[in-house]
Amino acid sequence: MLYQDRIRAACERLNVSAETLSAVVGISPASLSRFMTKNSNLPELSKLMRTIADLDALVIDANPYSLPFDDVEAVKKMIERFRAGLRFIPVVVGPAEEIADFEVEKQ
């Protein structure tokens, strides 16, 4: 159950449901459910684990912002661009006082 534990931990860490994760990866929610509960075969396991690693990296890049998991297609596009070498780095622009307040809040 090593992979199942890692997948559960990823869902908690990313604050995303297994159904949403399935949609992002492009696998059947039923297949993932069977894998998680009955340890059945999941041919897309390597794709799932790679996507989880990519999502973790995107979350780090996007900090302090969150990924738009309510828009699966946007997340898929972000992963595609990430794999192509594009990085998403938030840049705060504005008055110095507002930037200072923002920097304090995100810590």
Image (tube, rainbow, N blue to C red):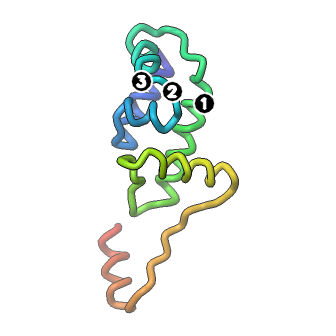
Task: Using the numbered discs, state the Cα–Cα distance from disc 1 to disc 2 in whole angstroms.
Answer: 9 Å
72, above or below 8, in the image: below
Density class for disc 1 (Cα within 10 Å; few <14, some 14-19, many ≥20) is: few
Q: Which mark is residue 36?
A: none
Lower position in the chain sequence, tag 3 or tag 1: 3
Density class for disc 3 (Cα within 10 Å; few <14, some 14-19, many ≥20) is: some
Task: Using the numbered discs, state the Cα–Cα distance from disc 2 to disc 3 in whole angstroms.
Answer: 6 Å
The residue sitting at 57% across, 48% down in the picture is 79
- SS at mark 2 in the image: loop
Q: Which residue is mark 1?
A: 47
Please indicate whether residue 48 sits to the left or right of residue 29 in the image.
right
* Residue 21 % position (x, y): 43, 35
Quarter of the figure that contains the C terminus:
bottom left
Amino acid carrying label 3: it is Pro
Q: Which residue is mark 2?
A: 27
Amino acid carrying label 1: it is Lys
Q: Which residue is mark 3?
A: 29
The residue sitting at 42% across, 53% down in the picture is 67
